Amino acid sequence: MSPTSVPANAPAKLHRPTVEQSAGLRRQARSRSLGRSIVFHVATVVLTVVILYPAVWMLMSAFKPTHDIVGNVSLVPHDASLANFAKALGGIGGVSFWTFFTNSLVLAVGSVVGITISCSVSAYAFARIDFPGRNVFFVLMIGTLLLPFHVVIIPQYIVFNRLGLVDTFVPLLLGKFLAAEAFFVFLMVQFMRNLPRELDEAARIDGAGHVRIFASIMLPLMKPALVSSSIFAFIWSWNDFFGPLLYLKKPDLYSLPIALRMFVDQTSVSDYGAQMAMAVLALVPVMLFFFVFQRYLVEGVATQGLKG
Amino acid sequence: MTLTAAPPTAGPSTPPVRTRRHKGSEVRAGYAFLTPWLLGFVLLTAGPMIASLYLAFTDYNLFAPPQWVGLDNFRMLFQDPNYLKAWQVTGIYVLFGTPVKLASALAVAMLLNARHRGQGFYRSAFYLPSLVGASVSIAIVWKAMFIDNGIVDRMQQAVGIEGGGWVGDPSRTMPMLVLLTVWQFGAPMVIFLAGLKQVPLELYEAASVDGAGPVRKFWRITLPMLSPVLFFNLLLETIHAFQIFASAFIISNGTGGPARSTLFYTLYLYFRGFQDFRMGYASAMAWVLVLVVGGITAFFFRSSRLWVHYSGEGK
């Protein structure tokens, strides 16, 4: 029921109107709600078209020859072909597309593993154990949530460079295993605080320690939080550009976004077909996650305020 | 509704009386579980922050040891025309991009909230750009759409606007990037929508009985009831907007051009730090950014007392 239909009917009931009056009111209300309904549908359909147009245009352009992409508003390819994809899959400078893909996958899966382990363990300390210093650390954790990360990357780079870890995945994954992604710690703390305390108290009385309570009670109950964290951790790592740009210099270590940028630099400016094909390929896993887990994703944003 | 503005205090069960004695085993368990975060905080956040604060007062190029130069870096910053340009570009982006994005998010959320059928579909569809918008792929698409004789140029020509593509025109790169961020209004929209669901319908009914129109209802009911969510979105989107990097980097081909029109703060920091290896200078830049963002955050929290209403009903 739309909120507006309530006030439209309410006065009619109050004054006990005659039959004709109430029919008139009802007709009025119905025509008004019909008008609103039309406005709603027109607006949402137009919005959907405008918003999804760039994405669909990208997908369709990947099947078009280059001369047919730039300036062509139409979505349907004249003579669809997979030539662009063949070129994109050919890789760059002797490195295969699948190498970049594997690199991205290793980084994304590594992030998911690191974040789920380190953030859930740390979150348990914040949410369920009472020890001196906890509140101070919690405030600091929230602080890092709002801190522009640029203030730490220069010294981090200097140290990783001195340790010979540039051109490895260590600089990109270490933070994930050390709960440096405060957003996920925060999300899990909030989730755990909403779990009934009676559960751990009962387990305590039965003699279970924190390790036991965490592993056998908290972790299973935290599944929704762990799933939405994993999805976001994967997608953020997959789309990350800045970190790999700093730390991955050898082409055979490139993640997809870096490879994509190289590809754009190397192909002549006019080869938009191959660029589109590679851009599409780079987004395939993200789109798969979106279609499979969209409810988790959108609910995660709605309830935890996660950013996209 | 979970907000970062949630009280940064301990769990609800902490007794009000301060117990001085914590059980030894609890303390050990607490620090044991917190170890990953503590290590990460010391090694990857606090340590580097102190180091970059030191570096900000030095001249350092990775090869020779750092030379103490006092306030020279900061003095140079404010005489560096590129640095001032970077602030101008970033400031305009934050000032226009964030409000337009949030206004669109709120407007669409209210549109969707009016009706429940099909809401799930639209919510997901409109959210999609937030998921991919900052990626290199989308930056490439955006560029292809806005180049000379690209589809945007063609549409302009159809309605009689001359001037060519936006990518090469310094006066139009900013609107192009603002459009790209506005396109990603889905994430704040989803959060607004969740907030709108919490507004009790009785308030609107009561207002209608009192003869309030839709405009009045918006200003007097919707906006105050949504203010905690608006605060959350405004804070996060603003901080986020200061840090735009990949889209500007890709669209300008790693140059910040044309005519420095996309020389965002983070781009310039990257050029100074990681192309010229002027680590001291870049550290000074990073610290100025932290101070500015910190100041804005503090301002938001302070001003929130005046305009953010937390209803007493909890959640």
Image (cartoon, grey):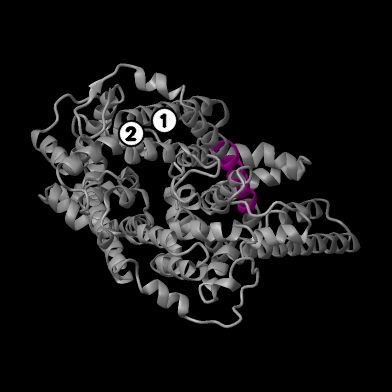
Q: What's the amino acid at mark 2? A: Val
> Can I make out residue B34 in this image?
no
Instruction: Report whether A57 appears left or right of A278.
Output: right
Which mark is drawn over residue B289?
1
- Name the spot of residue B132 as percent of width and height, x first: 46, 58
> Can I make out residue A230 in this image?
yes
Instruction: Report whether B36 appears left or right of B315.
Output: left
- Name the spot of residue B115 as percent of width and height, x first: 65, 60
Which residues are the magenta region? B94-109
Numbered disc 2: secondary structure: helix
Q: Is residue A221 magenta?
A: no
* Location of residue B303 with respect to A158 vertically, above or below: above
* Location of residue B175 with respect to A295 vertically, above or below: above
Marks 2 and 1, Cα distance to the nearest angstrom?
A: 8 Å
* Location of residue B105 with respect to B141 vertically, above or below: above
- The image quadrant where one finds the N terminus of chain A is bottom right
Numbered disc 1: secondary structure: helix
Q: Quadrant of residue A285?
A: bottom left
Q: How many marks?
A: 2
- Residue at far front of view: A268
Please report the residue visible at 25 percent of the width from the left and 27 percent of the height from the top. Answer: B50
